[in-house]
């Protein structure tokens, strides 16, 4: 991939950053430390930066995502200085908006556009990871307003709960449905089955995009 993020390898870096975020968040399952939330926040910020640099070629979204990062840093500082837990909801909303903006930018660059290369294939994996992350944040937001919405998920600081929410999200997205965590409130149930539907349709859309791009490339070569 080289040492510089370019348009030919940017999705590699972005995907690796998302995987690191998911893996690092699982530390709350094996470590019992009070500063774990700070670690998750730091790695989340690092993921934001990598996403931003990877998508700098899309200038319109770059400025938008940069403004979200600045706002998120400001809220994190306010929470740390004044110990205000109330800013958690705003931080989660900004995270959801950031990942949605990242998802939309990547989608415009890889689905049904031009020829398919390894970078775009990896980008399709990044899209899948972003889908799971967005729904995980949605579940964390639901817990902020309705702590009894899930069995198997306790209402606590979002940094401590991020790994469990991500686990449940990807289990739902892939329609595995282990059942160790399940929705109980009507709103949570709707969000959960919408994610399952999105997971199925995403796979169909990606396959159609890759097949269509491959056919177009073959036709151009034959012509």
Image: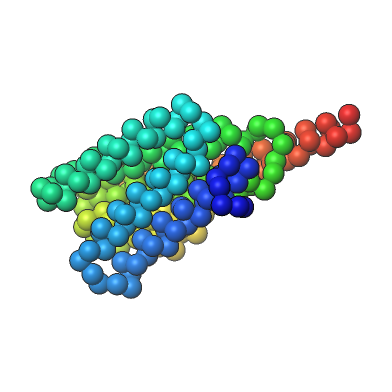
Q: What residue lies at 25% left-to-right and 58% top-to-bottom?
A: 38
Residue 27 relative to residue 119: left or right: left
Residue 95 can be seen, yes or no: yes
Q: Residue furthest right?
A: 222
Q: From this view, report whether residue 203 is shown above or below residue 71.
A: below
Q: Say which of 3 and 67 sits in front.
A: 3
Residue 96 in percent (x, y) is at 36, 41
Q: Which residue lies furthest to the front in this view?
A: 3
Residue 194 relative to residue 81: left or right: right
Q: What residue lies at 33% left-to-right and 39% top-to-bottom?
A: 69
Q: How is the image coloured?
A: rainbow
Residue 165 in percent (x, y) is at 35, 56
Residue 42 in percent (x, y) is at 31, 54
Residue 219 relative to residue 177: left or right: right
Residue 133 in percent (x, y) is at 41, 49
Q: What residue lies at 72% left-to-right and 36% top-to-bottom?
A: 115
Q: Say which of 141 and 87 sits in front.
A: 87
Q: In which quarter of the image is the C terminus?
A: top right
Residue 13 relative to residue 62: left or right: right
Q: Residue furthest left?
A: 82
User: For the image shown, how many numbered marks are present on the structure?
Assistant: 0
- Residue 205 picture quarter: top right
Q: What residue lies at 29% left-to-right and 50% top-to-bottom?
A: 140
Residue 189 can be seen, yes or no: no
């Amino acid at each position: 991939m080289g040492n510089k993020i370019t348009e030919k390898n940017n999705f590699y870096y972005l995907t690796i950053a998302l995987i690191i975020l998911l893996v690092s968040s699982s530390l709350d399952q094996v470590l019992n430390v009070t500063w774990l939330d700070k670690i998750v926040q730091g790695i989340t910020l690092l993921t934001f930066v990598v996403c931003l640099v990877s998508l700098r070629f899309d200038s319109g979204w770059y400025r938008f995502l940069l403004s979200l990062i600045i706002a998120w840093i400001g809220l994190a500082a306010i929470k740390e200085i004044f110990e205000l837990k109330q800013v958690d909801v705003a931080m989660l909303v900004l995270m959801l908006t950031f990942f949605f903006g990242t998802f939309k930018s990547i989608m415009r660059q890889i689905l049904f556009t031009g020829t398919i290369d390894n970078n775009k294939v990896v980008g399709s994996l990044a899209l899948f990871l972003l889908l799971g992350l967005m729904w995980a944040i949605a579940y964390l937001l639901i817990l902020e307003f309705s702590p009894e919405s899930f069995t198997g998920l306790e209402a606590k600081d979002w940094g401590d709960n991020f790994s469990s929410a991500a686990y449940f999200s990807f289990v739902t997205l892939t329609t595995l449905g282990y059942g160790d965590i399940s929705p109980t409130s009507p709103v949570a149930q709707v969000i959960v089955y919408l994610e399952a539907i999105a997971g199925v349709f995403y796979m169909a859309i990606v396959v159609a995009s890759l097949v269509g791009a491959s056919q177009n490339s073959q036709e151009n070569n034959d012509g």
